[in-house]
Amino acid sequence: FNLYYGPQTEDTYHNYYTSKTYNPSDPMSKDLWVNIDQMDKEKVKIHGILSNTHRQAARVNLSFDFPFYGHFLREITVATGGFIYTGDVVHRMLTATQYIAPLMANFDPSVSRNSTVIYFDNGTALVVQWDHVHLQDNYNLGSFTFQATLHNTGRIVFAYKEIPVEVSQISSVNHPVKVGLSDAFVVVHKIQQIPNVRRRTIYEYHRVELTKTRITNSTAVEMMPLPTCLVLLDFTSCSSCISSQINFNCSWCHRLNRCSSGFDRHRQDWVDNSCPDETKDKLCDIIDTTYLYPFTTTVVAKTTSRSKDATADRETPTSHPPTSVPTEDDTKIALHLRDNQAMPADNSVDRTPGTHPQHTGLILGILLVMLIMVAGVLVTVYIYHHPTSAASIFLIERRPSRWPAMKFHRGAGHPAYAEVEPVGQEKEGFIESEQC
């Protein structure tokens, strides 16, 4: 990276995107700033709730298909903290991954009457502007004004009008500070010991981290999407897929009739249909392989690159707000995955009992269960009558609301979100693994 300011721009390659940073002296930095005051007043919307709250997010519908990491989105979530959440399922840790962040920080629009969150959709682009927002934990630094523009071509522009302090000096103690992009997929694991309960794990498979020292007044960053296995129209057959000359190792899955690198939001379908095993040999001389799996193809719903994340739809989302007490989902976030870490838990095989069951073992098992139940009742009665005992305090401190899990919620109107620890640390069971 060239950290010196001058008339030149900076180009960076990020696998899924290329970014170009424009300095204040470059005319493009001014051209990329969208003057919302000159736009159609009927299309410019000031979000009343986001403009007067802290750590809140709201859904915004797009009038066009926005390609993000090869996936087409029609709905995004704008957060007060200077970023856009792109995930299909809303949860409490919106800052962890699946974001478009021109400047993610601890902004609180409610501390100033002049602070607003504005968005504008003209049919081909969406502009979101955080206007005169202040940091909650350091109001005296001044106000920040910046925007993110999402184009229907997948092009993303960050433009900065007012940055009163160097971004690297903004505290991340109470809220992460990030500039860039991130995407992830969700994998659902069945918990064999507990029926009807599943664990969802979010894997961040890619992140774009822009240089914070280059974010100043009157600067801009333009990010152009690169070809992926999902969106290229030419990759509609096995031969064209595996012979692709792009930066990804594209593989063809006959069961899904899909070209993929295996790392995208359709990862669950890719694994459930044994696509990683099918694509090991990378052969295309199988005649209509889908006929070899007639039962599978009639049950599994095929998805397209324009579909939402089918993984999250397989489980009925909870109707509770994302800040409710988690009781069923044991959900963890894994950043920078490896392929073997993305595989779902092995399905247990139903074992057929023998023709001569062990009656003694069965009886002992029933007695053991009865003893455990009686012990549980006695403990419950004791705790109820002795709420200040050591056992009661021990269980209260470890009640389900303290567990490192969180509920998922789809389509929340204005969900609150919580911050997570900076990259490189662990917090309450959130897993971090190395980047693939």
Image (cartoon, grey):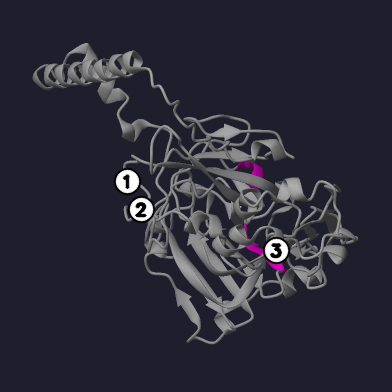
Measure the alpha-carbon separation of dots 1 and 3. 46 Å
Tag 3, which secondary structure? helix
Q: Earlier in the sequence, mark 1 or mark 3?
A: 3
| Alpha-carbon span between mark 2 and mark 1 | 10 Å
Q: CA distance from mark 3 to mark 2?
A: 37 Å
Q: Residue at x 73, y 72 (%)?
A: 30
Asked where in the image residue 125 lies, by quadrant, the reply is bottom right
Mark 1 belongs to which amino acid? Answer: Ser
Give the labeled residue for mark 3.
291
Q: Percent from the top left, x then y, of residue 136? A: 44, 48
Left-right relation of 206 to 186 = right
Determine whether, in the image, residue 30 is placed left or right of residue 425: right
Contact flag, marks 2 and 1 (Cβ < 8 Å): yes
| Residue receiving disc 1 | 324
| Magenta highlight range | 155-169
Q: Residue furthest left?
A: 385
Residue at position x 49%, y 30% in the image? 429
- Looking at the rendered structure, the kind of residue marked 2 is Thr
For the question of whether residue 275 can be seen, the reply is yes
Numbered circle sitting on residue 318 = 2
Between 332 and 267, the residue placed more toward the observer is 267
